[in-house]
Amino acid sequence: MHAAVHEVTPEATLELAGLPTMTRPTIVSVVGTRPNMMKIGPIAAELARLDEFDHVLIHTGQHYDREMFEIFIEQLEMRPPDHVLGIGPGTHAQQTARVMERLEPLLAEIMPALVLVPGDVNSTLGAALTAAKLVLPIGHVEAGLRSFDRTMPEELNRILTDQLSCLLFIHSPEAQGNLLSEGRPASAIFNVGNTMIDSLVRLSTAIDGRRTPHELGLESEGYVVVTLHRPALVETELLTIAMSQLRSLSRDIPVVFPVHPRTRARLERAGIVGDERLHLLPPLGYIEFLSLLKGAAAILTDSGGIQEEATYLGIRCFTLRENTERPITVELGTNILLGLAPDRIAEIPQMLASSPPASDALPPLWDGHAARRIVEVIRSHVGTLGATAAGHPSSG
Ligand code: UD1
């Protein structure tokens, strides 16, 4: 039996323990990649609405193309970042090290009351490590997810970031047990819900108004969306197999594939091009992509966050990975793990014809209010965290 974690319900009124009355505390959020923005955007909006903190947004520049960066800032209605570190591409060590080198002087100057980091990318770990070395308290948004596959760089980034964080914001039931079994204290774990779903809920009107499928000449529920970007798939010969399977699939049902820059480079090198049934598109904006996903018969992906968005929208998801750090999406029946086995793409028409419609059950607290709960926790703990960085929040 696990010790109880904090359930932060919308009704909860949290005591304002230790909040300084004279100066406004500063919160720094560090983002680096496309999916980080959907996770921090709603928190930035809630902090602005509350107007009790100075919020500094730092973008590491891990993603730097307009279609991977600025368009998300605009569509998520975020204020442009206060600082962009320009770390760019590189090996894992280079990216992590560049974040550390460029972030350290900024954090040392700001000395925020809390550093917020979302997700599991190299920028997340680089920022957490930098803050921890400066003995700054860290809050991890999307804590406790585990694939139990340490060959994935994201898994190392998750485990280490959780070890360094004193506020662990979880959105999936199993995250609590994962964190407790790694020695993280129950008092640091806050079950708040999913800020990525907050973004989806906030922008649902814009998403419904966008009509991306119609613009592409696609019928509602008459196409499959594809996203593939993980090195284990796209930097091996598996990509060629996947593309040939997708071409076959597209004879049954049109396939729409917004291509990540990493994947685009590989396809170009291999001379692989699309056709009128296998649509290869540039990366789409958030609103365009969600509009496309919402109208799809299914999605095939190796992304993490898209498994969650598909579950929320009740769209069948086929995941081309051996494992998932998001088992709730499988338990609820919307997500099927195909393995790292692109040959299995051939089974999709059969599975679409025979599998029951996706369930409309949702994980607890995926309700559009996660950011509000996170900011409530921050309000009640900021000012009590300084001496307990990498430990656990004092009870206030
Ligand atoms: C990173 C994350 C991954 C996340 C993904 C979301 C890590 C370890 N990986 O992977 O967890 O799911 O972001 O997209 O942090 N590139 C561009 N333009 C850009 C961004 C990248 O051309 O705006 C190119 C880079 O130059 C590089 C390649 O795409 O050649 C990969 O970028 P990188 O940030 O290293 O990793 P991702 O595959 O995006």
Image (cartoon, grey):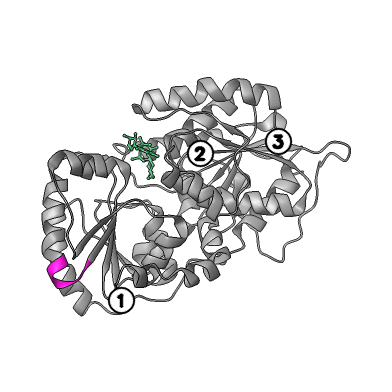
Q: Nearer the viewer, residue 300 or 255?
A: 255
Helix, strand or loop at mark 2: helix
* 164 versus 309 height, above or below: above
Q: Is residue 79 left or right of residue 147?
A: right
Q: Amino acid at mark 1?
A: Glu
Helix, strand or loop at mark 3: loop
Q: Which residues are magenta?
A: 250-254
The residue where tag 1 is placed is: 221
* 299 versus 282 height, above or below: below
Cα distance between the residues tagged 2 and 1: 39 Å
Q: Is residue 56 left or right of residue 33?
A: right
Cα distance between the residues tagged 3 and 1: 49 Å
Q: Is residue 332 left or right of residue 40?
A: left
Q: Residue at x 66, y 53 (%)?
A: 45
Q: Residue at x 51, y 35 (%)?
A: 163
The residue where tag 3 is placed is: 385
The residue mark sitting in front, 3 or 1, is 1
Q: Amino acid at mark 2?
A: Asp
**Which percent across, then down, holds residue 338?**
21, 59
**Which percent across, then down, holds residue 388?**
67, 32
For residue 162, the mark is 2
**Which percent across, then down, holds residue 25?**
77, 37
Residue 144 seen: no
